[in-house]
Image: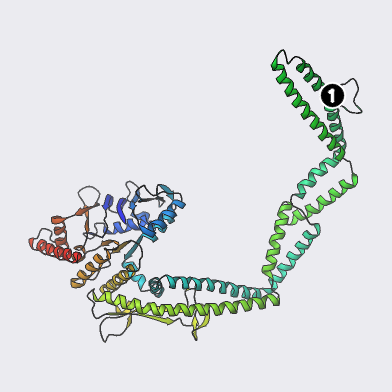
Amino acid sequence: MLEELRITGLGVIDDTTLPLTGGMNVITGETGAGKTMVVTGLGLLFGGRADAGRVRAQPGRAVVEGRLRLTGRVADAVHARITEAGGEPDEDGSVLLSRTVTVEGRSRAHVGGRSMPVSMLGEVGEQAVAVHGQSDQLRLLRPAEQRAALDRFAGPAHEKLLDALREAYTGWRRVVDDLADRRRNARERSQEADLLRLGLDEITRVDPQPGEDDELKTEAQRLEHAEGLRTAAQIAQQCVAGGAEAAEETPDAAVLLGTARRTLEAQAGTDPALGELASRLEEAATLVTDVSAELSAYLATLDADPARLQHVYERRAALRALTRKYADDVDGVIAWADRARIRLSDLDSSDDLLDELDREGQRLAVEVADLAGRVSASRQEAAVRFADQVTVELAGLAMPHARIEVAVLPRPAGRAEPTLSVNGVEVGVTPDGGDEVELRLLAHPGAPSLPLQRGASGGELSRVMLAIEVVFAGSGGPPTLVFDEVDAGVGGQAAVEIGRRLARLARSHQVLVVTHLPQVAAFADRHLVVAKDTGGAVTTSGVRVVEDTERARELARMLAGLPDSDLGIAHAEELLAVAAKERRL
């Protein structure tokens, strides 16, 4: 649940904190007082689009902060994702969320004490909160949204089947599009393939090896300067270890080090420090001996071979010819060849490959058609359950004679999507199958079955939306539900029933309701009032919790516009008593 929400610098709200509770939280207030800003703040906190026009000029930024406390699998999933992103829940298991928007439109987000992308707030919001407003009612009129609602209701097994369909559909369209492209662009593909083969043939003849250009450059330098290198190595060897050409009277380094070591060792008994120095001279003599051996080996390999030098020149020239055409160095040429081989396989337009792709496309089409048929059957079964459960809820929302029908119809062929035979009928197929889903309302016995957008008034649509949400709540969903004036256009007994249903939802969920209806507000576990202050130079709004007499006065204002009317207060107290009795049932 969302335990606390603080909003600063957003619209008419300067700085206010909403202490929320489990159960049903109701937010009321005069029109224009800023109730919408509370819902806007919630949207920002959970990754919604930021509107810089709603940020107050002073202090120049809007900040929304919230403390979220989750339990069960939702908590495990959210905490794991936040920890993976570098954040950290508090010691008590709650998570701090924050969103800042400046007047320039810049936006920042913090989750679990760490700066995060705004998308992370959206990920948390998907798990924790579902917001329903009048715009959601409009979305429910779209066929795609109605299909999505039915798929959500159908359950995990249906979702798994739908995922398999989407995966098969993607593979099928990839093969079909590949085949069509190979046939349509056969000439261009053939020309590109010929050029790639020419390049690969040239590279294959030279057969460059990784790092070969650098190795040849080093070898060429040695061969070109072989005499100078030999002279230097010979002189160095004579100096460290003597040699046949060294003058007999010229001592070498090894002899001098040996003499020095022996001299010090002779006096080591008198002063141990000289013994330590003698040991170090012995180490130096060993090192000099190793260098002398390596110089001998180097001289043995050093050969001024004109034939080898010529071969190196020719090889480097062949490699330069490749690097001029295909890459900056030999390793790049090798990489180009690897890419060219892969591209050649993509360009293959041989009859054998085309036949193979055609067979694979047909096989996948059969698989897609089969899965689409199974998805359709699953939707048909879920549609009956969904319609029955929503109809039961409508009866409790003062629509006792209304009935919801969910029509699952074949999607007409001939549109932009491909066509397949599903269950013996030619239908247009999308990644979501070959069905069109339509919610229909029978407002009363004898009335025609009409699509929601034609058969439902504003008040009826609000109740249908609430009934659907009650049905969804029974099958899980986010732990916090927000309803933004979904009771618009409703009054009387229907309003009482909406309040009762929201209170029932609040037994298993945290419910936040923005409403103008006192019948709904009376069912709240916590009642918050948004009030406008026009006493200063700038109009601001704040939120306060009302209880007992204050709450009755607020309901009286909502009932008759007269918060101090004794008759209105009496009516409000009666309404509160009825709601309290209903909640205890």
Q: Amino acid at mark 1?
A: Asp
Q: Is residue 269 above or below residue 545?
A: above
Describe the element under mark 1 as helix, strand or loop: loop
| Residue in view at x 57 percent, y 77 percent | 364
Q: Position of residue 395 (x, y in %)?
A: 24, 76
Q: Which residue is mark 1?
A: 252
The quarter holding residue 135 reads: bottom left
If the image is split into quadrants, where does the N terminus sit? Answer: bottom left
Q: Is residue 69 left or right of residue 261?
A: left
| Residue in view at x 31 percent, y 75 percent | 389
- Observer-nearest of 391 and 196: 391
Q: Is residue 78 left or right of residue 402?
A: right
| Residue in view at x 31 percent, y 62 percent | 481
The quarter holding residue 318 reads: bottom right
Q: Position of residue 299 (x, y in %)?
A: 86, 36
Q: Is residue 457 visible?
A: no
Q: Position of residue 288 (x, y in %)?
A: 79, 28
Residue lying farthest to the left in this orientation: 566
Q: Is residue 101 above or below residue 557?
A: above
Q: Is residue 448 visible?
A: yes
